[in-house]
Amino acid sequence: MSMSEAEKRKLGFDTRCIHSGMAVDRETNVLKRPIVLGNSFKLADNLAQLPDAFDWDISHSFNYPRLRHPSARYLEERLAALEGGEDCQVFASGVAALAGVFFSLLSAGDHVVSSRLCYIGVHEFLEEHLSKRFGVRLTLVDTTDLDAVREAIEPKTKIVHIETPANPTTHVSDIAAVGEIAHQGGALFTVDSTFSGLVTQRPIELGADLVIHSLTKYINGHGDGMGGAVIGPTDLIRKIQNAATVHLGASISPFNAWLISRSIETLPLRMARHSTNAMKLARFLESHPKVKFIRYPGLESHPQHEIAKKQMSDFSAMINFGIKTDDPMKYFDFLKSMKIVSHAVCLGHTESLIQFYPQAGDHPELGVLNYPEDVGEGFLRFSVGLEDADDLIADLDQALAAVK
Ligand SMILES: Cc1ncc(COP(=O)(O)O)c(C=O)c1O
C-alpha cells in the first residue's frame, strides 16, 4: 500500500528524507523515481482538460520543462516536506532561487532590508542590479544587531532578508527575533539557510515566510551538482513560479534534480558527521598556537553562540580562522602544504575545502572581493568534510607548521 505525500509529512524527518517525493514508477515498478529527460509532454486532446497541463495547482501536470518537469517536481515535494513549507520551487542554482524570489516579489520603489554580511552574489545582485538599475531601494544592515534591523524598516519595506549562518563569516542572526521585526513592519521575511544544511535549522517554524537553499552545498553534498530552492506558502511559491520559471528560465536540469534528490536520502547522516567533525576541528584550531582567531557557531567564543544554540540543533560545519602572520602571502605557504584539504571554492561537500579571503584593500593582486570592512583581517573559510577528523587535524597541523 502506498502513502500520499500528505500522509508522509507526518513521518519522522529521516523517514521523510527517504520516502517523500518518492513512489513506485507505474510503468516499470522501479522503486526509485526515474530521471525524465523529455522536454515535451503530451497535451490533452480535448478542450476541457487542455488547461490542466498549465495549471500549477495540479501537482503533476507538465507541458514544458522550463516551467516544471517530473524530476524537479519530485525534488520539490521532498524539500517542501523536509523544510515544513506548503510548497517549493527549485531552480538551476542557489543564486537563481534568490534572484527568482527578488525578481518575482519586488517592484521599483519597494524597499529591502538585507544582511550586510552574506554571500557576495546576493549582496551584488541587490546592490548593483536591483538597487542601482531597477529602482528597488536597499538598506544593508548587520542583521545580528536587532536595533539596526528595527531602524532600517520603512513603510515601503517589502522584504527583510537574512542569511544565517552567513557566508563567509558564520555570523548568526536571530531568526525568530528578526522575523518578528519584519512582520511588525508589514514585510515578508526571507531566510537563506544554506549553511545550516537544512537538517540543523527550521526557519519556517521560527517565523520565516520563505526559506532559500543553495542545493549545490550540503543538500547535494557530493560536489557534483547544482541547484537552488525556495520553500514557503503556496501563494508565494505560485507567484515565484509564474514570474521566475517562465520569464527567468533558470530551470534545474532533470539530472541535477535527480542527483540532489538521491543525495537527500543520506543528508541527516552526513550532517551529523559534518557537525561532529567540525566541532573536533574547531577545538583543535582554538588551541593551536599559530591560530590568530577562530569563529565557529558551536564554540562558546563565537559572538552569537547563544543564538546558534537556541535556534540550531547542531552547528553544521563552516569555520573561519586566521593565522598569526602579518603577511597575507604567508597564507599560501599554508594552502600549498595541505595534502587532504583542497584550496577551492564551494562548501558542504564530502571532501574538506578551504578558501582564503584576503584582507580587504591590502593586496588588490589577490582579487579581493568587495566584502564589507568588518570581514576584517583576512581569514580562511573552512568547510569541514566527512573524512576522519584525525586525518584532517594532522593535515592542518602540518600545514600550519609550514607557516614560518
Ligand atoms: C549562503 C549562500 N546562498 C546562495 C549561494 C549561491 O548558490 P549557488 O552557488 O548554488 O548559486 C551560496 C554560494 O556559495 C551561498 O553560500
Image (cartoon, rainbow, N blue to C red):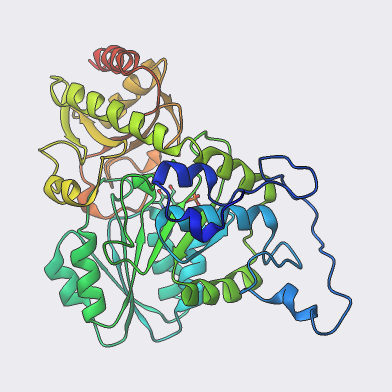
* Residue at (66, 41) in percent of width and height: 32
Q: Position of residue 322 (x, y in %)?
A: 22, 32
Q: Position of residue 197 (x, y in %)?
A: 38, 44
Q: Could you say which is closer to the camera, residue 21 or residue 133?
A: 21
Give the farthest residue toward the front.
1
Q: Position of residue 134 (x, y in %)?
A: 47, 79
Quadrant placement of the C terminus: top left
Asked whether, in this view, residue 288 is left or right of residue 105, the answer is left
Asked whether, in this view, residue 274 is left or right of residue 7, the answer is left
Asked whether, in this view, residue 64 is left or right of residue 370, the answer is right
Residue 347 can be seen in this image: no
Dividing the picture into quarters, in which one does residue 151 lie? bottom left
Dividing the picture into quarters, in which one does residue 278 lie? top left
Q: Position of residue 81 (x, y in %)?
A: 46, 56
* Residue at (44, 79) in percent of width and height: 106
Residue 138 can be seen in this image: yes
Q: Is residue 275 above or below residue 111?
A: above
Q: Is residue 43 above or below residue 4?
A: below
